[in-house]
Amino acid sequence: MQIVPKIKPDQGTITFFLASGSDRQMCRLATTFNTQKQAFSYLQKHRTEFERMARARLASGELEDGIVVLSMLSAET
């Protein structure tokens, strides 16, 4: 799987797509960071864990309006 990030205008919120073959799933990570740069850095640092979480939520059908919604890892909040 591959993460393709798209930075949203909201502070600290990153939207990215989980890629698996030709399938793409939109995911959104809400953070408490003040800047998009900080949020993107955080996403990159914890990429493997967020991919795992997103795949698990997708498999269990945990979607909000067709989007996998993630939040910061509990140790980081």
Image: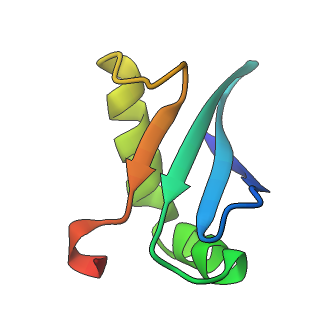
Rendered location of residue 51, percent (x, y)? 47, 47
Q: Is residue 20 above or below residue 75?
A: above
When the figure is inspected, residue 58 is found, relative to residue 37, above or below; the finding is: above
Q: Is residue 71 left or right of residue 17?
A: left
Residue 65 position within the rendered picture, expressed as x and y whole percent measured from the top left? 52, 20
Q: Nearer the viewer, residue 27 or 34?
A: 34
Q: Is residue 22 left or right of residue 42?
A: right
**Quarter of the figure with the N terminus:** top right
Task: Name the side, left or right, on which 57 lies relative to 37.
Answer: left
Q: Residue at x 57, y 39 (%)?
A: 27
| Relative vertical location of residue 23 with respect to residue 18 in this rendering, above or below | above
Rendering colour mode: rainbow
- The residue lying at 69 percent from left, 74 percent from top is 36
Which one is in front, 25 or 38? 38
Residue visible at 34% across and 30% down? 57
Q: Residue furthest front?
A: 10
Looking at the rendered structure, the number of numbered marks drawn on it comes to 0
Residue drawn at x 45%, y 40% is 69
From what the image shows, is residue 15 above or below residue 1?
Answer: below
Apparent side of residue 54 relative to residue 6 in the rendered image (left or right): left
Quarter holding the C terminus? bottom left
Quarter occupied by residue 10: bottom right
Answer with the quarter of the image where residue 54 lies.
top left
